[in-house]
Image: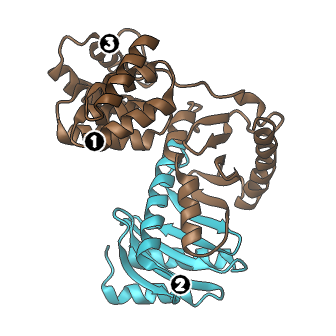
Chain colours: A cyan, B brown
Amino acid sequence: MTAPAAAYGKALDLITRVRGVRGAMLVSAEDGIVVAEQLMEGIKGPALSALAASLATRLRRAMEAAGVGASVFWHLQAEQGALLVVPTPGGTLVVAVAEPDVNVGLVRLELLRAAEVVG
Amino acid sequence: MPDEIKTLSSQLAQDPDSLVFLRLGELLRHKGQLDTAHRVALTGLERHPHLPDAHDLYARILADKHDYERAFDEWDMALRIAPDHVGALKGLAFLYFKVGDVQQAAAHLEAAQRVAPDDPGVAQALAMARGEGGAEAGTVAEPQPIAPAAQPMEEARVFAGLEGAQEGLLLLDASGRVLGGALKDPAGRDVTDAVAAYLAGVSQEAARTVKLLGLGKWTGLAAEGKLGHVHLAPPSSDALLLVVRDRAVPMGRLAIIAQRAALAARRWLEAHA
């Protein structure tokens, strides 16, 4: 991780400004610990970060085994919302929780921008 | 063998703390009675949590059930308790072979050989891992300790007529067992088993994640890789569909392919229920 702590908040701001985003967080991909978060009330950050990191690890291994390389962006779709994730080269996951009608392309863009800030 | 199973079961019933569960579990595993073997091993493990042989037995049964991730954990635990445990070293070597990490597999087999230099199974597997005896390193046979598991069911037929049925579509059950389809990497190598092993449990993990967030059921997972795209979908609550395509196929198009494949998978699962 290369950015100072103050930059994390700005990185998360980029994401939560998008309409339909219920929260965003930075998660250590290795151990599933929350690095920074801006979540709406009711979202359990620590549990979510652990599950997101675990899912990211399985997915990364499967994708590498399949020969499609490391994941750049992934999007878990559900009936009433979505979880969108961008892994950074430095081992952080930039995570967004969103409403079902969110503009996925826009969130993806902001997640990628935030990932550049976080490093 | 049935008599021995009966005798050992009786002994275990009389003395639940007895170590005969190790022999009994192994016999049941060899007979293919994996669910019973699983119960025996788990009960034994609960009574003897620090016994490396108990973890080894449990791991073998899990591996036979294609639950490779938990098998890895159990063999890893056996090695933490007994760093020279040959069964665990061979088991981990097997799992590394399975995911194509021949270097790690060979390292574990070398460690096993240092402990058991006269074990012909270790020597044979190691020779193959090193590419000796005419076998290529990536195509070594599975080491001895694990009995062959059940074969995939009529795998070619699940996605009959669908594009990429034999190189980019895969149907798995909850434990990562391949039910149909196949997967090849960009170099044309079959990576079905390796990918299936890593995807074991993904469906449950996705379900837990969306449940935690109160988002209802999960309907799909789209992932963009540096060299290709992946789409996962749950055609049923205990099955997982994987579609893989190169980056030239847009994510939206991939979602449509996945929808069609999920429909075919659902029909197939219902027909084989």
Where residue B3 sits, quadrant-wise, is: top left
Amino acid type at image mark 1: Arg
Within-10-Å neighbours for mark 3: few <14, some 14–19, many 20+: some
Q: Nearer the viewer, mark 2 or mark 1?
A: 1
Q: Give the Cα distance between marks 2 and 1.
A: 45 Å
Question: Do the dots labelled 2 and 1 sit on one chain?
Answer: no
Within-10-Å neighbours for mark 1: few <14, some 14–19, many 20+: some
Inspect this view and state whether residue B64 appears: no
Name the residue that disc number 2 marks: A23
Q: Residue at x 52, y 45 (%)?
A: B200
The quadrant of the rendering that contains the N terminus of chain B is top left
Q: Residue at x 23, y 25 (%)?
A: B86
Q: Is residue B225 above or below residue B145?
A: below
Name the residue that disc number 3 marks: B124
Please state which of residues B6 and A78 is positioned toward the viewer in this rendering.
B6
Amino acid type at image mark 3: Gln
Chain ID, mark 3: B
Q: Give the Cα distance between marks 3 and 2.
A: 55 Å
Q: Is residue A104 above or below residue B244?
A: below
Please state which of residues B166 and A89 is positioned toward the viewer in this rendering.
B166
Inspect this view and state whether residue A12 appears: yes
Q: Is A42 left or right of B20, judged from the image as shown?
A: right
Where residue A35 sits, quadrant-wise, is: bottom left
Q: Residue at x 58, y 54 (%)?
A: B203
Please state which of residues B39 and B148 is positioned toward the viewer in this rendering.
B39
